[in-house]
Amino acid sequence: MNANRRFNSIARRIHRAWQWKKLWVTLLVDAAALLACAAAYLYVRETEVTGAFAGLGIARGFTAQEGLSNLDWVRSLCYTFTWAGEAHVVPLRPFLHLAWVFGRPLLIVEGVVWLLGFLGGARSARRLLKPLDRMAEKAQRLSEAASARPRVDEAKFHDLEDALGRIDIGDRLSTGDKDLKGLEDAINNLLARMHAAYRQQAQFVSDASHELRTPIAVLQGYAGMLDRWGKDDPQVLEESIAAIKSETEHMKTLVEQLLFLARGDNGRMQLSPERMDLKDLLTETLDEYRMIDATHDWRQGSMDAAPVTADPALIKQAARVLIDNAMRYSPEGGIIRLSCGGGDENCWLEVQDGGIGIDEADVPHIFDRFFRADPARARQSGGTGLGLSIARWIVERHGGWFEVLSRPGLGTRIRVVLPRAEETVEAMEEGA
């Protein structure tokens, strides 16, 4: 009952606020129309004397008799102007009389219509707001039920997850009133974002749990083997230690990447952009990989100036992700080529390899979290399935995008495109 009274009170307040606003708008429109008619009347009376509008070069003004009451003072108003050395006076009383004759019925009709709307429109407001009230009432009931029964069977939560997963975003909130269209769109967009965020979070947690389950199982297996036989067997001990070190390193990498993406999703990752050249960054990175990896044929492609405004550390991290993937999926002795360049609006860096390539159907998904075109091979090579997701987050935060070209058995070329630094473009144009 209290909730119903509160809802009716809110509906009445919204309706009254809207009606008062409509009244003021109506009065302003009437005043504007009256002024426009008065200006037209004076224009016609003036041109009867001058033959045409004389512009601003003549003296004009208004006069009225002194010592009269307010109404008589208004009736005595006259418009004066000087033409050819002669002063002309145009009384406003005929115009005011005409405006009163025609304006009074109009004001009465407007007043009656407004009064009827003010007194009888609350029901319409309640009808339009009823869908929102039902939503709030259901949310309140859910909240009260949750607080009253904190211990709910876990199966219920799974049922709720399944129900949320089956929500059809096409079933949009609609009241059928155009005045509430903006509010409807805002609520529907919010519901769509909540649904997408829930699906993404559920998938992320599921994939992360799956990825962590394998190294934990490996660690448990080797720990059990050590406990049973490894204490006195040097070969088992050495094999177990090596496996444990490998799996813990894999878990460390996975957790660091998960934390990176979590900070990015929560908006806690701060960029430190500065003007830089992709050519310098890629040249430095190429020299580093030539030192640490002698099993591949490192090639330098075209290295043209590519000025951008970006966070150097994050852009280098994205480049390393692409290069590490090229190393991981290229055979020994395979060619890996790094290139960069720029145009009038965008700059790019590119990593090309002659490795195993990617199926065409898998290309749209390679930036999804934990996606692997070949899970067994990725697991064997030590990949987590998060590197390209991190690279995508970095590039998109810089306003850029990826261009991917890959053929199975021929290799892959991934290009990162970033907006060119505007200040650099201007400086180059001025010096040209």
Image: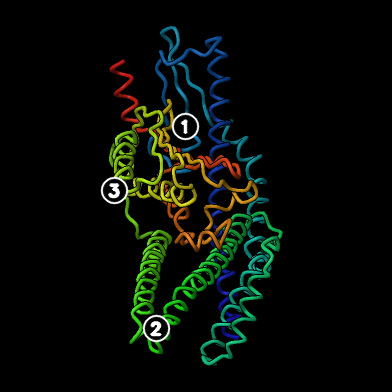
On residue 223, which mark appears? 2
> Residue 158, percent across and down?
61, 81
Query: Circle 3 sits on which residue?
Result: 272
> Residue 156, percent across and down?
62, 86
Residue in view at x 29 percent, y 24 percent = 427
Query: Circle 1 sits on which residue?
Result: 77
Q: Nearer the viewer, residue 138 or 235?
A: 235
The amino acid beneath tag 2 is: Ala
First reached walking from the N terminus: tag 2 or tag 3: 2
Residue in view at x 31 percent, y 30 percent = 423
Is the image coloured rainbow, by chain, by secondary structure, or in one colour? rainbow
Closer to the observer: label 2 or label 3? Answer: 2
Task: Using the image, determine if residue 18 lies above or below residue 12.
Answer: above
> Residue 24, percent across and down?
53, 51
On residue 310, which mark appears? none
Q: Nearer the viewer, residue 399 or 219?
A: 219
- Left or right of 428, for residue 167: right
Residue 300 in view = yes
Task: Using the image, determine if residue 300 lies above or below residue 408.
Answer: above
Asked which quadrant contains residue 335, the reply is top left
Q: Which quadrant, please, contains the C terminus? A: top left
Instruction: Mark 2: give few (<14), some (14-19) or many (20+) Cα within 10 Å.
Output: some
Residue in view at x 46 percent, y 52 percent = 328
Q: CA distance from mark 1 to mark 3?
A: 69 Å
Q: CA distance from mark 1 to mark 2?
A: 105 Å
Instruction: Mark 3: give few (<14), some (14-19) or many (20+) Cα within 10 Å.
Output: few
Furthest residue in direction top, as rendered: 84
Task: Using the image, determine if residue 214 lies above or below residue 74.
Answer: below
Q: Secondary structure at mark 2?
A: helix
